[in-house]
Amino acid sequence: SRDCLFDTTTKKYMSFFQSRHVGLINAGVTGLGLLTNEGPPHWHPASADLKDLCRNASLYCQEQGVELGKLAIHYALQQPGHCSHLVGMKTLAELQCNLEVATTGLTGSESKILDNVKEKFFKLPQDLHWEGVEINAYRKYKEEHGLK
């Protein structure tokens, strides 16, 4: 499902799924790396605007000495209704950071930084996502190359 700092689409449908006893796995906690200080892989399908927004949030977090991914994971873990959260990790340090935030939460300073991140970067009039990007690119390619 989608429930992260820049996309809370799942909240609109949570009561529907809960009323039918369907558990949701939140697999978009860091937005495939967008919400980390390292940033997403080069192939990430998000728009340039969303990548820039997340990069700016990351730069702010780096200036504050905080990992954006830690804040993103904490945010997701605080959202009600999910039966589980799925997070990819590449290093032992990432695993340790994620376990720490899951078991002890954020410090007071980190909580304030998260509030600032939400206010400065992710107080959006609408949810941002990349749904349909790949299929639209595929259709455009077919059209440009005369394929059916």
Image (tube, rainbow, N blue to C red):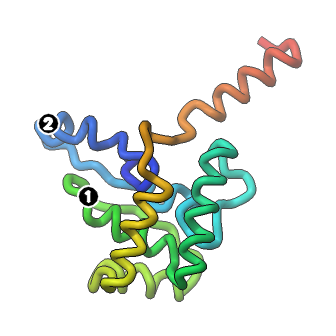
102 vs 73, left or right, is left
Rendering coords of residue 12 (x, y %): 27, 36
Q: Position of residue 3 (x, y in %)?
A: 37, 51
Q: Position of residue 94 (x, y in %)?
A: 51, 81
> Image height check: is 62 above or below 81?
below
- Asked whether, in this view, residue 3 is left or right of residue 39, the answer is left
Name the residue nearer the viewer: 107 or 74.
107
Q: Left of 52 or right of it: where is 66?
A: left
Task: Count neighbours of disc 2 (C-alpha within 10 A) and say few if under 14, some if 14 to 19, many if 20 or more.
Answer: few
User: For the residue marked with disc 1, what is the amino acid?
Assistant: Gln
Q: Residue at x 50, y 68 (%)?
A: 88
Q: Nearer the viewer, residue 68 or 97?
A: 68
Identify which residue is drawn at 40% across, 62% down.
86
Q: What residue sits 47% from the left and 58% below the top?
A: 120
Q: Nearer the viewer, mark 2 or mark 1?
A: 1
- The part of the image, by quadrant, that contains residue 141 is top right
Q: Is disc 1 surrounded by few (<14), some (14 to 19) or many (20+) residues within 10 Å?
A: few
Q: Amino acid at mark 2?
A: Arg
Q: How many numbered discs, if any?
A: 2
Q: Give the x, y percent position of residue 146.
A: 86, 12
The mark found on residue 20 in the picture is 2
In the image, residue 48 sits, relative to residue 61, either above or below, namely above
Q: Which residue is mark 1?
A: 79
Label 2: element kind: loop
Q: CA distance from mark 2 to mark 1?
A: 19 Å
> Circle 1 sits in a helix, a strand or a loop, which is it?
loop
Q: Which corner quadrant holds the C terminus? A: top right
